[in-house]
Each structure stands twice: as structure tokens, then as C-alpha cells.
Image: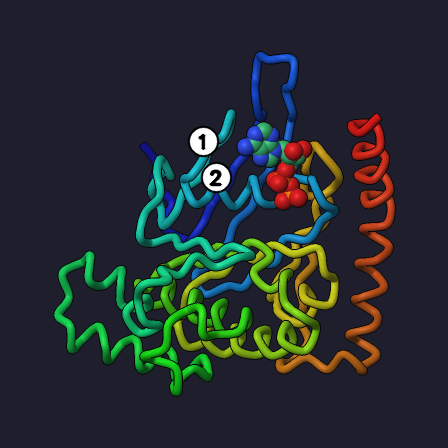
Amino acid sequence: MTRHNSGAVRCRSVRKVWAEGTGKETVALEGIDLDVAPGEFVVMLGPSGCGKSTMLSLIAGLEQATGGSIEADGEPVVEPGPDRCMIFQQSSLYPWLSVAENVGFGLKLRGRPRAERRRVAQELLRTMGLGDVLDKHPDELSGGMRQRAAIARALAMEPKVLLMDEPFAALDVQTRAKLQDFIGQVWRDSGASVLFVTHSIDEAVSLADRIVVFTARPGRIKAVIPVELDRPRDPRSPEYHQLHDRLIDLLADEVDRAFAQQEQAAS
Ligand code: ADP
């Protein structure tokens, strides 16, 4: 078999049909070709229901594609692996463990000694602005802090690919902006590739090396836009506005189509 070691993730002609062969069949994705380079930050942008989360689950190995191929680091993806960590909108920290123990939990499963787990947790939590809450429990933290701890827990496993499914969508606007800053920093330090799903144009322009715009369902790639603005990105700059407007134009028809699909499904 030919192996391609050039990229962190390689998707070819990916198709996903949910509930195939039943009356409730849904073609979620069609003909997806996507490469993510090592260390690259790719944002998937598209209307609700266009298959973005489905795409992440396939790359995570939580679900199997109906057709096409997905490789991570040159190996076909057949199941979840520690090289690919998924972060969801609502983090799922263990409530009975301290924040530091949560962050070190995966390392414990790998048999790493307690002192090492503590050191790694300390370092990561400090980078995420959580150096003061190592020994607190998740229910003592705000939503934004819990989400940062969940990201630290994923990074402790030193994944090659971080798969983030609208990780900041449940947070208020200010917290969301702060977390975007944090993720920008830790991503650069970690060297991991990131595949980040959002339907926020601002989030995409703030974070991405490349933005992949999806069509309404069945999700296809409508455009791939490299973002060549210096970081940190200035939302007041004319270049930022230009790109933002271009993305609004690209998405407008797709959002209308997705809305019509939802209305039809509900009637
Ligand atoms: P997005 O993340 O872009 O909002 P999703 O990937 O969640 O879109 O969903 C794409 C389509 O696939 C939607 O029509 C959704 O209802 C359907 N879908 C998603 N997950 C499942 C599932 N587990 N079973 C059946 N249909 C699903």
C-alpha cells in the first residue's frame, strides 16, 4: 500500500452517509479532499448541519466514512488514537478529580509517575492561565476555565492533531476572545496541527492559517482560503475586513440553503 507521510491528515474523496439504506438516510459529506500539514491551523467554516462535526468524528476515528480514505500521519484511520485528541463544546472533566489530576489523567493511564504528571499539569495549566487552580475541582471553575483545563488535558497527551468542535461556542464573547488568544499561544508551542470547527467568521479569521468553507448539506468544500494576515490579528485592519466580507459572501447562499433544509425537515 502507498503511504503518504507528508501530512498530519490526508482526506481523499470522503463521503459519509448517515443511516444508509434506511428511510432516514442523510448524505452528510461528499467528495471531501483535504490535507492538513503538520503544525497547521485549519478552520472548517460552514452553516449548521453541513457536516463539519461529522468530518471531525471521521478524522478522530469515532465514526467510519462511507467512502474515500482518511490517513493520519500516513496511516489509515480506523479507530480513535492518542495521536488525535478531540475537544467538544462542553468539556467533560472528571468531577471527582482535581484540575491537575484531570490534566494528568491520560498520562496516568500511560503509566507515567505521579511527579511527572504533576509537573506536566503545572506547566500546561500555567500556560493556559490556570496556575492558581491546580488543586481545585472542576465545579469550582467557570465555564471558560473548565474549557481551558480540558484543552490542557488534551495537550498533556502530546497529540499530533487537535480536533476542536466549536470549543468556545458556549462561552460569553469576552471569555471567547481570551480563549482564542490562549489557543493561539498553546498551538504554536505544541507544534500540533489543529482542525477547528466553527460557524463564526470572526473566530475563523482570528485563528486560521487556512479556512475551509463548506457548502450546505451534503457538505462539499466550496473554497479554501489561506489567511496571510500577521498574528495577532487586528479586527480593525482593512485586510481583516476584506477577508471577513469575502467569507460572508461565500457563506450567504449556503446559509440560505441550510436554513431552507431545516425548515423543510421541520414541516
Ligand atoms: P455541522 O457540524 O456542520 O452542524 P453535522 O456534522 O453535525 O453538521 O451534521 C451533518 C448532518 O448529518 C446533519 O443533517 C445531521 O442531522 C446528520 N447527522 C449528524 N450526526 C448524525 C448521526 N449520528 N446519525 C444520523 N445523522 C447524523
Q: According to the image, label 2 marks what residue?
A: 58
Mark 1 highlights which residue? 64
At a point 78% along the width and 74% down the height, the residue shown is 240
Q: Is residue 130 above or below residue 170?
A: below
The answer to which quarter of the image holds residue 97 is bottom left
Q: Is residue 213 above or below residue 24?
A: below
Q: Position of residue 263 (x, y in %)?
A: 84, 33
Residue 188 lies, in percent from the top left, at 46, 75
Relative placement, left or right, of 207 versus 189 is right
Quarter of the C terminus within the rendering: top right
Q: Is residue 242 left or right of residue 40?
A: right
Name which residue type carries label 2: Leu
Q: Are marks 2 and 1 in contact (CB under 8 Å)?
A: yes
Question: Relative to the observer, which residue lies in front, 104 or 236?
Answer: 104
Helix, strand or loop under label 2: helix
Q: Residue at x 50, y 60 (%)?
A: 194
Q: Quadrant of ligand 1?
A: top right
Which mark is on residue 131?
A: none
Q: How would you rate the neighbour count of disc 2 (Cα within 10 Å): few for under 14, some for 14-19, many for 20 or more?
A: many
The image shows residue 67 at horizontal and vertical percentages of 51, 26
Pick the front one: 10 or 145: 145
- Residue at 63 percent of width and 82 percent of height: 232
Task: Identify the element where label 1 is drawn.
Answer: loop
Query: Relative to residue 265, is residue 207 depicted above or below?
Result: below
